[in-house]
């Protein structure tokens, strides 16, 4: 069998050792690979700016949540969006997604070139949602209602179908998770950047992964700071589901939500003007 260029000298040395009576176990095969792998982003096939946006999709009736990097839900054969929905019970997961039942609840926008931070936040949001779906307490197993006759609170066990609906409802949890992730929560969050990396992003450079960046801050570093992010809401009142937001997060409205808000304000003003009586001077 012909030997390769790198292994030929080592193979001949092994033959020499065997002929001299040296045990074979003392011969160590060598290689010419580098000890540290280098990043090759050109092989990922991601579009430019991948990870700079996180779209949060909300189901209108079940209040399920799907995260996406694109402004359209993936309803193709790969079904990346459908795979995010958990299987709770029989017929709890739809066969396909209906676009008329899903609306973008929020959009998380990161600075240009900070797609790595967006991918890190995307991963943690999905992990937190999965923990909500698996690590639920008695509030999902039981329901409490008020007895109309006695006025007392009655506790009863949910059926399997009702429990599935309760677990699917992740709207409030998703908003609280967004606040925690954008505040740098979670181990290894890439939202923490050093002063040099922040200057690089502001200058139009590209933020690299923590594994490949030599300027990435360490845990508890004095010069690390949070990367800025902007959250665009369809309903700005949704942000109140989170107890608090960090200072690096800005809140805005979608453009169509702004237009709708302006139309509603104009209609209210017109109604008020019509209902206000005009007092005639004597």
Image: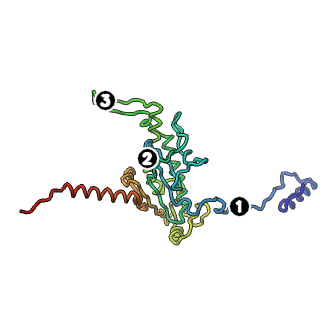
**Viewer-closest of 236 and 37:** 236
**Viewer-closest of 30 and 81:** 81
Which is nearer the N-term, disc 2 or disc 1? 1
Specify the farthest residue to the top. 149
The structure residue drawn at horizontal position 47% and vertical position 57%, both measured from the top left corner, is 108
Q: Is residue 150 left or right of residue 39?
A: left
For the residues carrying marks 2 and 1, which lies nearer the camera in this image?
Answer: 2
Residue 279, image x, y percentages: 12, 59
| Secondary structure found at label 2 | helix
Residue 37, image x, y percentages: 68, 61
For the residues carrying marks 3 and 1, which lies nearer the camera in this image?
Answer: 3
Q: Work out how far the residue at label 2 is from the one at label 1, CA to CA, in angstroms.
A: 45 Å
Q: Work out how far the residue at label 3 is from the one at label 1, CA to CA, in angstroms.
A: 69 Å
Say above or below: 162 vs 195.
above
> Are discs 2 and 1 less than 8 Å apart at CB?
no
Residue position marked by numbered label 2 in the rendering: 171
Label disc, if present, on residue 35 of the rendered structure: 1
Which is nearer the N-term, disc 3 or disc 1? 1
Residue position marked by numbered label 3 in the rendering: 147
| Secondary structure found at label 3 | loop
Label disc, if present, on residue 13 of the rendered structure: none
């Amino acid at each position: 069998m012909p030997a390769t260029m790198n292994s030929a000298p080592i193979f001949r040395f092994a033959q020499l050792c065997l002929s001299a009576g040296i045990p074979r176990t003392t011969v160590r095969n060598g290689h010419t690979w580098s000890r540290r792998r280098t990043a090759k982003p050109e092989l990922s096939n991601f579009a430019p700016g991948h990870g700079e946006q996180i779209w949060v999709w909300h189901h209108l009736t079940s209040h399920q949540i799907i995260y996406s990097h694109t402004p359209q839900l993936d309803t193709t054969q790969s079904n990346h969006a459908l795979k995010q929905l958990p299987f709770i019970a029989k017929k709890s997961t739809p066969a396909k997604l209906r676009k008329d039942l899903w609306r973008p609840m929020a959009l998380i926008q990161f600075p240009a070139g900070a797609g790595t931070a967006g991918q890190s936040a995307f991963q943690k949001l999905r992990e937190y949602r999965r923990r909500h779906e698996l690590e639920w307490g008695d509030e999902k197993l039981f329901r409490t209602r008020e007895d109309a006759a006695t006025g007392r609170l009655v506790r009863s066990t949910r059926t399997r179908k009702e429990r599935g609906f309760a677990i699917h409802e992740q709207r409030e949890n998703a908003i609280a998770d967004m606040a925690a992730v954008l505040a740098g929560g979670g181990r290894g969050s890439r939202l923490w950047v050093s002063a040099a990396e922040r200057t690089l992003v502001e200058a139009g450079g590209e933020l690299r992964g923590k594994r490949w960046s030599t300027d990435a801050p360490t845990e508890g570093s004095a010069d690390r700071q949070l990367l800025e992010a902007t959250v665009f809401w369809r309903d700005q009142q949704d942000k109140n589901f989170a107890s608090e937001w960090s200072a690096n997060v800005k809140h805005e409205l979608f453009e169509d939500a702004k237009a709708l808000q302006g139309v509603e304000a104009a209609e209210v003003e017109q109604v008020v003007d019509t209902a206000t009586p005009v007092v005639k001077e004597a």
